[in-house]
Structure formats: structure tokens, C-alpha cells
Amino acid sequence: MKAIEELKTTEDQYKVIGVSTCHIMAADAARLEQIRREGNNMVMPRDTGAFVKLYPDIDGETRNLEEDYPGFTDAFYNVLKLAKEAGYSMVEFDSAATEYESLSSFDW
């Protein structure tokens, strides 16, 4: 079908990675909920975590994660930075998502 082929070939796609919430701190989880209430449409909290859409770089200028998402810990920024460098446009933080040996873990 033409519609399916059109959808498959669009450049308006997002590569998403699942990351366990154990890789962020409890303060980050609370901040995700707070930032959503403040009207940030790049964050969508859920009962088990949150989706965080990463702003794209524009004209070769790297976005500043601390400016885009103020008030988080270095652990949170590290996960976003690594995900972006790996080619992802969105991070799904979820309690049941993959735990990565190379990332710091927090027991909260």
C-alpha cells in the first residue's frame, strides 16, 4: 500500500531507547513529574517512569541539556547525553526497562 510505504520512508521518526529508572535518582523522577506540570511538552510521565524527548541539534550547534531540562542531577544528564550520542531522539525511563552495566545505578 502506498500509505504504508510513505509512513515507512518518512524522516519524521524517533528512535527510542528504554532505560531503567534505576539509572536516575529519586530526585530526577520527582523533577520529571514537576516539569510536566510546568507545561513542558517534551516530558510525558507515566506510573512506571517517563518519556523524555530530546531536542535536536540545530545547524551543528549542540543543545545544552541543562538548559533544556533544568534542575536534574548529573546522572540524569549523563543518560540523556549518552542516548543522544548513540543516535536516540527519545528516552523511555521505565522501572521494567533494561538495566545497563555501564551506567550508574541508584537504589530508591
Image (cartoon, rainbow, N blue to C red):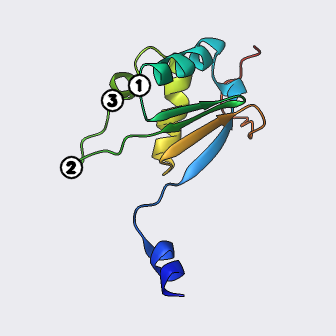
* Residue lying at 54% horizontally and 24% vertically, measured from the top left: 76
Q: Secondary structure at mark 2?
A: loop
Specify the quadrant of the image occupied by residue 94: top right
User: Quadrant of the rendered structure where residue 10 is?
Assistant: bottom left
Q: What amino acid is labelled 2 in the image?
A: Asp
Q: Quadrant of the C terminus?
A: top right
Name the residue that disc number 1 marks: 39
Between disc 3 and disc 1, whose residue precedes? 1
Identity of the amino acid at label 3? Asn
Disc marking residue 64: 3
The N terminus is located in which quarter? bottom right
The residue labelled by disc 2 is 59
The mark that comes first in sequence, 2 or 1, is: 1
Q: How many marks?
A: 3
Q: Residue at x 47, y 43 (%)?
A: 84
Marks 3 and 1 close (CB-CB < 8 Å):
no
- Compared across the picture, whether 108 is left or right of 71 comes to right
On screen, 75 above or below 81? above
Rounded to the nearest angstrom, the CA distance separating label 2 from label 3 is: 14 Å
Mark 1: give few (<14), some (14-19) or many (20+) Cα within 10 Å: few
Left/right placement of residue 66 relative to residue 24 reads left
Residue 90: x, y in percent?
52, 44
Q: Which residue extends farthest left?
A: 59
Residue under the image location 57 percent in, 17 percent down: 28
Q: Nearer the viewer, residue 49 or 98?
A: 49
Q: CA distance from mark 3 to mark 1?
A: 19 Å
User: Tag 1: residue type?
Assistant: Gly
Q: Residues within 10 Å of mark 3 (few under 14, many from 20)?
A: few
Q: Position of residue 20 (x, y in %)?
A: 71, 33
Residue 71 lies, in percent from the top left, at 44, 14
Q: Residues within 10 Å of mark 2 (few under 14, many from 20)?
A: few
Tag shown at residue 96: none
